[in-house]
Image: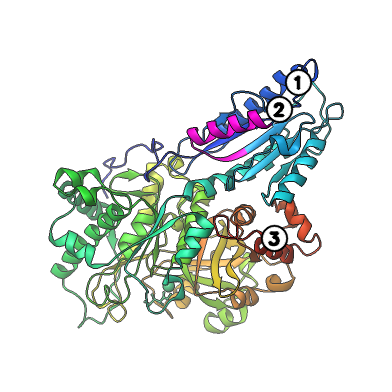
Amino acid sequence: MSNRKIYRRAVPQEEPRTIGMAPKVGIRPVIDGRRQGVRESLEAQTMDMARRAASFISSNVRHTHGAPVECVVADSCIGGVAEAAEAAEMFEREGVGLSLTVTPCWCYGAETMDMHPWYPKAIWGLNFSDRPGAVYLAATKAAHDQKGLPVFTIYGAGVQDIEDYKITDDVGEMILRFVNAGLAVATIRNKSYLSIGSVSMGIAGSMIQEDFFEDYFGMRCEAVDMSEITRRMEEKIYDEKEFHNALQWVETYCTEGEDVNPESKQLGREEKDQNWETVVKMTFIMRDLMTGNPRLDDIGYGEEALGRNAIAAGFQGQRQWTDYFPNGDFSEAVLNSSFDWNGIREPYIIATENDTLNAACMLLGHQITNSAQIFGDIRTYWSAESVKRVTGYELTGKAADGIIHFLNSGSAALDGTGRQTRNNQPVMKPFWEIEEEEAKACLEATRWCPANLEYFRGGGFSSQFLTRGNMPVTMTRINMIKGLGPVLQIAEGFTVNIPGEVHQILNRRTDPTWPTTWFAPRLTGRDVFRDVYSVMDNWGSNHGVLSYGHIGDKFVTLASMLRIPVAMHNIPRERIFRPSAWGAFGTKDLEAADFRACQNYGPLYGKNG
Ligand SMILES: C[C@H](O)[C@@H](O)[C@@H](O)C(=O)CO
Ligand SMILES: [Mn+2]
């Protein structure tokens, strides 16, 4: 392997790759409007609180493209309706996508509140005794609830003094939880989902429900036939220079793996080389379809150069494409990873089998972690007894209660090898933190196996790797239930290591050319999380997504903003942060209350919303 530095240093992209400005956070300092004493005495402090919140947010939150999130503070404190309208107008002009209202004091609830129909909203009322920010918080929350505009309420547990209005740890955590999810809501709005092809092998998730993307995400759905890829290959509608760079990169960094096909059926060297050329072209063509490419304009394809503003996509592949052409595994794996021949960069979100509902989880997971995502089949539940029977080995540690074989060809990002590290522990980092050596290590841990020709008659190459154990991960899935709508499932857990020979035995019972993650959900001893079998048994479909970290709580917060109920999760109650109105739908059984709340509000952009 060459020591040549082929990667650019990881620097944040300056701009998002989709059309439009990155959304900003609007900060609204609200104040008691009474002049001749009250207002004047509070002006400086209120504005200062807003500025502190703004700099706290900008120094702690980044967009998925790496740039720090910008905040816009209203020009003046908001004491009543006129100033609220001025702030609203300024926010629209500036591209605000969510708002945080801050105040140390009593102000006039409905006169100062943010009435925007879909900005995620939060209010931070300072915990004071002399000027009661909490009273405003409660009054305005009531106004939000009464008007059907749910709001997150932020209030520190400790009383602060008048001269001490810093952001305490508990307040800071709530602000970040709110901004993290609110930014995701604002970022995906007005972007597209691109289906390349249509329904794969009768998989329900690939029957796109446009109403779901439109009403819940504010996104539009685009579709192109897979023949568009053939046209671009044959008519050379791509950047020839990039093609050569990419091929070179593949030669240097992508090692071919075992060919599991019977010798008599294996493709020859020439055919395999031809397949490499095809899968490389498929990769940048899919990317160009998603987000465009100015180079195409240079060669006379102005329309193609524009792309389709897609923040997420899916490739049908099976079977019409893969029965005839090389499969999409290389393209999907590389696009979803944080690096390719152009350097270390933000992952593109693209789902195998055009499973739009897995793509939705990958999209949300990427938005709230900034990292790459692992797509997979929830393939097999391996109980400890079964593992023992088949291999003689006793599962131990986090795997002791059984494991799920998480496996699918295609969209598992190579970041999922677990070869990026922090304090010697495997992690999946945002692209701007990934070092060259780490990107290389992910590639070195991957073999590209000639596709199993029984499944993929057209050949291609599947990424074969084994995820390192001990990564905290969160598995998610959105399912579509007729009469109910979308429902989110969440299972936090760990990737686990099992001995190499045990892995070999288990893996070789299925398709060994694909990437494997051994996943152990964290059990709670209750309900669905009483054992691993029940987790698998209750999973709503054949697919799921693994995101890095224990971030189920972030998904819960985001789902509440979108009004998607969460049907199962293993997150402790103290990490749940939802709009305050959720409490009005029940405080004992939070899962049932969430369903009632989501049903009451309806999808964020829906007709009932
Ligand atoms: C090759 C096979 O058709 C697989 O792609 C299939 O098992 C799936 O992944 C189904 O989700
Ligand atoms: Mn699958």
Single out the mark in the foreground, 1 or 3: 1
Q: Amino acid at mark 3?
A: Ala
Identify which residue is drawn at 50% across, 63% down: 212
Q: Can residue 112 be seen? A: yes
The residue to which callout 1 is attached is: 39
Left or right, residue 5 beside residue 173: left
Left or right, residue 80 beside residue 243: right
Residue 82 is a magenta residue: yes
Identify which residue is drawn at 77% across, 39% down: 137
How far apart, in angstroms, are the residues tagged by discs 1 and 3?
A: 37 Å
Residue 76: image x %, image y %? 63, 23
Q: Amino acid at mark 1?
A: Arg
The residue to which callout 2 is attached is: 79
Identify which residue is drawn at 19% across, 68% down: 272
As displayed, is residue 464 above or below residue 365? below
Which label was assigned to residue 597? 3
